[in-house]
Structures are given as structure tokens and as C-alpha cells.
Image (spheres, rainbow, N blue to C red):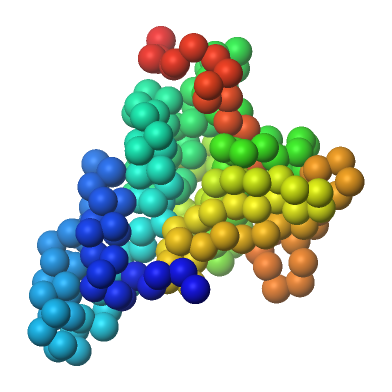
């Protein structure tokens, strides 16, 4: 079983995720207090790292830990905002951009790609609809593809069931994603990673 966020032993790990983003939405001071409460076995400690949500901070930390700089992946505590940056770069410089957006069924995912869905009450129908609202907050979630065995796409994300968790997405014989099964939100966007295939991106 994955280690849970409320386990005080995981405090330094989730702290590192938050330190990878430029804005922490008050997460670090709030959860320092909760951590102290957890060590003292006080009720507030049960909420350790429960808010703010840290899934986007986790994704940002993964790329930072891999040595990817902010020009190639703009770290953010909000999935929608780092996606805005990646999409804007891809639209302006499609030949050089480190990530290229696709509809989920346009290509077979590969390790390093991002699979993203909309968690909002009125989800977008296609990723291009995001262009009209870029820069505005929207509840989203992304996982990083780590393996693509036959019939599956395995991806890892943070703050899933209060832990770093692997999700298995069904894929067809050609490796492309199949429709979301009942009870699972449909994917909105596949961000193709070209990191390592092109010279490091430093912007215009």
C-alpha cells in the first residue's frame, strides 16, 4: 500500500513537493503546524497535508528532480497553469517545444507524457477550449506515464487516494487509450513529452 500523506514520516517528502513550486498557497506553514500537532497526537494532526491539494506540486517536483528547468516545464501548484505554459509554448514554437498537446486518442502515450483530465463541475470537452480561459483557475489533474505494456498505459500521480499512486488506463492493440470505463472521468489531454529528443528549450 502506498504511504499516506497523513503519516508524519512522509512530512519531508510532501514538503519537498511544495518546495518545487513558486507558490505554496500557505501549504507549508499550515502543515508545519499540523505536523507538530501530529507528533503531539493532537486532533489537528490528522489533517496533515490534506489541504491544499499537492498533486500539481508533485508533478512539478518530478520534473525538477529530473533536472528539467522552468523554461521546459513551468512549475506550478495548479495543473491548469503549468499546462497553460506548455500549450502556449507549443503553439508558438511547435518545432522546438518540449511538450505538444494532443487529444487523448490521437497517439499512443509514451513514458514521460502527461495524461490530464478536468475535475471541474463543467468539464471542458476538448483541450482547445482551455485557450479561451488560459490563466484562469480550473480544477484539473495530471498523471505521468511510466510504462506502456500491451493493453495498458500505467501512469503515476500525486494526491490520488491521499498518496502517490499508479493508475492503469486501458489501451487498444495500437497502444492508444480507450474510452474511460464507467465511473472514471474521461481524459481531456495527452501532453506528448519531447524532453531528451530535442535540444533543451530556453525560450525565444
Q: Is residue 5 left or right of residue 95?
A: left
- In the figure, 65 relative to 179: above or below? above
- In the figure, 10 relative to 39: above or below? above
Picture coordinates of residue 169 (x, y %)? 71, 57
Q: Looking at the picture, tell me which residue is in the foreground, 192 or 175.
A: 175
Picture coordinates of residue 83 (x, y %)? 48, 39
| Residue in view at x 35 percent, y 38 percent | 65
* Quadrant of res 37: bottom left
* Quadrant of res 158: bottom left
| Residue in view at x 76 percent, y 36 percent | 107
Q: Quadrant of the C terminus?
A: top left
Picture coordinates of residue 111 (x, y %)? 62, 39
- In the figure, 202 relative to 114: above or below? above
Q: Is residue 109 left or right of residue 97?
A: right
Picture coordinates of residue 172 (x, y %)? 86, 49
Q: Is residue 183 left or right of residue 24?
A: right
Q: Looking at the picture, tell me which residue is in the foreground, 103 or 113.
A: 113
Asked if one can make out residue 182 in the rendered structure from this viewpoint, the answer is: yes
Asked if one can make out residue 118 in the rendered structure from this viewpoint, the answer is: no
| Residue in view at x 81 percent, y 53 percent | 151
| Residue in view at x 81 percent, y 49 percent | 150
Total labels drawn? 0
Amino acid at each position: 500500500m502506498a504511504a499516506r500523506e497523513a503519516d508524519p514520516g512522509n512530512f519531508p517528502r510532501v514538503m519537498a513537493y511544495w518546495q518545487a513550486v513558486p507558490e505554496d498557497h500557505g501549504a507549508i506553514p499550515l502543515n508545519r503546524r499540523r505536523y507538530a500537532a501530529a507528533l503531539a497526537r493532537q486532533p489537528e494532526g490528522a489533517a496533515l497535508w490534506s489541504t491544499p491539494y499537492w498533486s500539481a506540486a508533485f508533478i512539478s517536483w518530478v520534473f525538477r528532480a529530473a533536472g528539467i528547468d522552468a523554461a521546459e516545464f513551468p512549475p506550478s501548484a495548479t495543473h491548469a497553469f503549468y499546462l497553460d505554459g506548455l500549450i502556449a509554448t507549443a503553439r508558438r514554437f511547435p518545432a522546438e517545444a518540449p511538450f505538444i498537446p494532443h487529444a487523448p486518442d490521437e497517439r499512443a502515450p509514451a513514458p514521460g507524457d502527461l495524461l490530464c483530465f478536468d475535475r471541474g463541475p463543467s468539464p471542458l470537452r476538448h483541450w482547445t477550449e482551455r485557450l479561451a480561459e488560459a490563466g484562469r483557475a480550473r480544477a484539473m489533474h495530471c498523471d505521468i506515464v511510466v510504462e506502456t505494456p500491451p493493453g495498458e498505459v500505467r501512469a503515476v500521480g500525486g494526491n490520488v487516494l491521499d498518496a502517490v499512486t499508479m493508475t492503469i488506463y486501458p489501451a487498444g492493440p495500437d497502444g492508444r487509450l480507450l474510452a474511460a470505463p464507467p465511473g472514471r472521468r474521461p481524459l481531456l489531454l495527452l501532453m506528448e513529452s519531447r524532453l531528451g529528443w530535442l535540444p533543451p528549450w530556453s525560450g525565444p
